[in-house]
């Protein structure tokens, strides 16, 4: 077995080139203790240890405390379960958007059909849409009459709605 | 290689998972840390606990150590802060003559508030010192000179070789032989 004492002395003085001595010290408790004593010789000569209890060596207690803390850190906390990846949310997110877009389109189509109907048509000729409240009469929501819409206004509005719909569809398609 | 490079090497090893490298840093610096603490902590019985706290803080903070300053300067700052926190927890004020990190390298601890209520530890400390000085006094001149120039003057092997007019290898060997002779007397004293 190689004798490392002289290399250890050089290590204390930072006068070494070979990394082997560090490996040797880290793997040998006796060499570590010898390292402490060599270090202490210098500390005592420089009077850095005056008034200290030289029998106390905190190395073991420090390393034990660190090992204990690391063990605590490795315990998996019970309150934070790992989030599971499922396909439910992405599925709902993706197809939900299409569903909303389809319903909006349906509403637009139905409303444009109603608006495009001839104004002259008698209300009684469209019984399905001629809804009468249960009470027999309905109070007006507002006393202000809405101005009559021209065909141009209706056409313009429909075009705007279509453009909006196309834009919305385009956004859905380009979304990842 | 200088002290700073060795410390950085050890820190890199710790960051790579070699925990024992931290034990070596503790062994290297524990006396200096305890010496700084004597300025703040009056009771010698508390110094090991506060020292332990310092090193645990250092270990936890190592991922943040960027190596901009020397490890010892950084350690010094953590030691002083921990000591001040200790004083606060004890409802005591820090000493009037404070020290800062810039003084770390030159701080020798003289004038610190040494504990004098533990005669046993003082006696032991004096005994250790006497043994070391006695062994050095009995060494051949070339060994005595080499260990003194290294430990007290802080000279490098190269500088000692120039003064002693001998090869660096001889300086290395002389310093080791001096330490070996002291260690032979010191080991039983510390084990007892």
Image: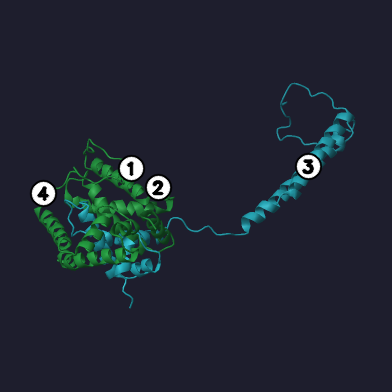
Chain colours: A cyan, B green
- Distance between the alpha carbons at the discs numbered 1 and 2: 10 Å
Secondary element at tag 4: loop
Both marks 2 and 4 on one chain? yes
Q: Residue at x 72, y 47 (%)?
A: A100
Question: Mark 1: which secondary structure?
Answer: helix
Q: Nearer the viewer, mark 2 or mark 4?
A: 2
Q: Which of marks 3 and 1 is in front?
A: 1
Q: Residues within 10 Å of mark 1 (few under 14, many from 20)?
A: some
Disc 4 and disc 1: Cα gap in Å? 29 Å
Give the mark toward the camera: 3 or 2: 2
Q: Which chain carries label 4?
A: B
Q: Residues within 10 Å of mark 3 (few under 14, many from 20)?
A: few
Chain bearing tag 3 is A
Which of the two labelled residues, at mark 2 and mark 4, occupies the earlier sequence position?
2
Residue of label 1: B101
Instruction: Tell which tag, 3 or 4, sits nearer the viewer.
Output: 4
Marks 3/1: CA distance? 65 Å
Real-space Cα separation, disc 3 to disc 4, in angstroms:
86 Å
Tag 2 and tag 4, C-beta contact below 8 Å:
no
């Amino acid at each position: 077995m190689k004798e490392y004492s002289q290399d250890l002395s050089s290590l204390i003085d930072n006068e070494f080139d070979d990394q082997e001595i560090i490996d040797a010290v880290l793997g040998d408790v006796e060499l570590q203790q010898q390292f402490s004593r060599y270090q202490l010789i210098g500390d005592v000569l420089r009077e850095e240890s005056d008034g200290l209890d030289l029998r106390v060596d905190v190395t073991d207690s420090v390393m034990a405390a660190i090992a204990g803390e690391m063990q605590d850190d490795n315990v998996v906390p019970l309150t934070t379960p790992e989030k599971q990846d499922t396909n439910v949310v992405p599925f709902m997110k993706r197809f939900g958007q299409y569903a909303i877009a389809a319903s909006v389109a349906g509403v637009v189509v139905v409303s444009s059909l109603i608006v495009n109907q001839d104004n002259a048509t008698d209300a009684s000729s469209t019984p399905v849409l001629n809804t009468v409240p249960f009470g027999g009469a309905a109070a007006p929501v507002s006393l202000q009459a809405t101005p009559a819409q021209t065909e141009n206004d209706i056409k313009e509005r429909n075009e705007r709605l279509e453009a909006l719909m196309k834009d919305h569809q385009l956004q859905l398609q380009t979304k990842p | 290689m200088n002290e700073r490079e060795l410390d950085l090497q050890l820190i890199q090893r710790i960051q790579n998972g070699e925990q024992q490298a931290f034990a070596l840093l503790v062994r290297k610096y524990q006396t200096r840390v305890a010496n700084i603490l004597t300025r703040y902590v009056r009771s010698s019985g508390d110094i090991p606990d506060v020292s332990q706290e310092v090193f645990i803080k250092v270990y936890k903070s190592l991922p943040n150590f960027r190596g901009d300053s020397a490890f010892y300067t950084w350690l010094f700052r953590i030691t002083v802060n921990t000591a001040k926190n200790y004083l606060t927890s004890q409802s005591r004020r820090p000493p009037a003559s404070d020290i800062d990190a810039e003084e770390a390298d030159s701080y020798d601890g003289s004038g610190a508030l040494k504990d004098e209520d533990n005669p046993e530890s003082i006696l032991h400390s004096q005994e250790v010192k006497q043994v070391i000085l006695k062994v050095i006094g009995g060494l051949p001149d070339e060994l005595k000179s080499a260990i003194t120039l290294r430990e007290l003057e802080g000279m490098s092997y190269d500088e000692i070789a120039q003064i002693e007019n001998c090869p660096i290898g001889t300086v290395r060997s002389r310093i080791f032989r001096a330490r070996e002779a002291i260690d032979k007397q010191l080991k039983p004293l510390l084990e007892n």
